[in-house]
Image: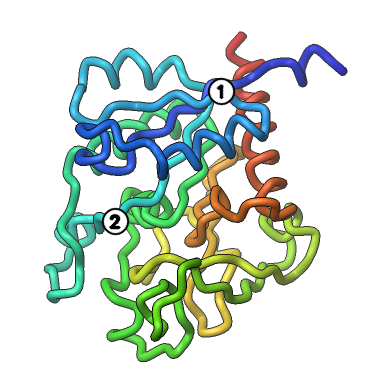
């Protein structure tokens, strides 16, 4: 084993919500921590309400995972108003993600945005969101448990198609994969320098990749952190942590 593979890059993960942080509610954020740890990284939780702690921790990280959240991005951030389907925003979470992204892009540190994190990444780069996929597009594809009746205990599964030459296609080792789904919003207009690289069968954007420079920045609309035992999900986190390790080596 080479010295490089022994490096465990530090991966910052903001708490999913202000409420979960205040309660110390760990089970859902732990899925992200475990996925990073299993891939060879060292997860570090970033507080949402403590700006001083953020300023201390964020520069010390080698990469970042932006996790999912039951909140929705504030529509005003992408030039819209709440049409009655957008969940309340968690402004502390938004501010933390924006501070992370500003640093990550400036310092070329890898970012993996997942579900809400993918949407926030898109809005940060000037993109817009569909506030409610089912009511606005009329899709019959289930994108979350409540789209099905009776509601199942596990996330719905549907296909994803990857664009030729994309990083996601390379990691998947195929043009298609089965992914889980737990969202009601999605990307409408992609942000600046984001290439759309994955779609669901009904045309929803499922993955985007940064093209502004060589930095590893990917957003996925699904939840690889809870696709337990799935080889593609494990490779995605492995590829991310490998990029984080490269950033750590450049810093050292």
Q: Among all residues in the image, which is located at the extreme top?
A: 252
Asked which secondary structure carries label 2, the reply is: loop
Q: Residue at x 22, y 34 (%)?
A: 23
Q: Position of residue 239 (x, y in %)?
A: 69, 40
Quick one: 58 or 106, which is closer to the camera?
A: 58
Q: Could you tell whether 5 is left or right of 210 in the image?
A: right
Q: Position of residue 196 (x, y in %)?
A: 54, 65
Q: Residue at x 41, y 41 (%)?
A: 27
Q: Residue at x 34, y 60 (%)?
A: 127
Residue placed under numbered mark 2 in the picture: 70
Quick one: 81 or 42, which is closer to the camera?
A: 42
Q: Residue at x 50, y 40 (%)?
A: 32
**Colour scheme of the rendered structure:** rainbow
Q: Position of residue 143 (x, y in %)?
A: 44, 75
Name the quadrant of the N terminus: top right
Q: For mark 1, does the 10 Å Cα neighbourhood hold few (<14), some (14 to 19), or many (20 or more) residues?
A: some
Q: How many marks?
A: 2
Q: Position of residue 39 (x, y in %)?
A: 67, 34
Residue placed under numbered mark 1 in the picture: 42
Q: Could you tell whether 243 is left or right of 34 in the image?
A: right
Q: Could you tell whether 33 is left or right of 174 in the image?
A: left
Mark 1 and mark 2 in contact? Answer it, CB < 8 Å: no
Asked which secondary structure carries label 1, the reply is: strand
Q: As displayed, is residue 126 above or below residue 175?
A: above
Marks 1 and 2, Cα distance to the nearest angstrom?
A: 25 Å
């Amino acid at each position: 084993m080479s010295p490089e593979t022994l490096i465990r890059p530090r991966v910052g993960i903001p708490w999913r919500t202000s409420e979960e942080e205040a309660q110390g509610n760990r089970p859902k954020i732990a899925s992200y921590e475990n996925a990073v740890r299993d891939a060879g990284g060292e997860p570090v939780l970033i507080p949402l309400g403590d700006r001083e702690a953020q300023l201390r921790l964020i520069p010390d990280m080698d990469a970042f995972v932006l996790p999912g959240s039951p909140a929705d991005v504030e529509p005003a951030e992408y030039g819209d108003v709440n049409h009655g389907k957008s969940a309340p925003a968690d402004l502390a979470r938004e501010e933390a993600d924006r501070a992370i992204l500003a640093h990550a892009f400036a310092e070329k540190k890898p970012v993996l945005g997942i579900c809400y994190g993918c949407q926030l990444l898109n809005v940060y780069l000037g993109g817009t969101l569909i506030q409610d996929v089912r009511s606005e597009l009329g899709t019959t594809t289930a994108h979350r448990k409540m789209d099905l009746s009776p509601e199942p205990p596990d996330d719905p599964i549907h296909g994803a198609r990857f664009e030729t030459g994309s990083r996601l296609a390379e990691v998947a080792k195929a043009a298609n994969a089965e992914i889980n789904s737990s969202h009601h919003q999605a990307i409408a207009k992609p942000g600046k320098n984001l290439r759309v690289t994955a779609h669901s069968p009904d045309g929803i954007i499922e993955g985007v990749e940064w093209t502004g420079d060589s930095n590893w920045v990917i957003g996925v609309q699904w939840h690889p952190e809870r696709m337990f035992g799935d080889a593609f999900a494990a490779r995605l986190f492995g590829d991310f942590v490998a990029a984080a390790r490269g950033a750590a080596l450049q810093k050292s």
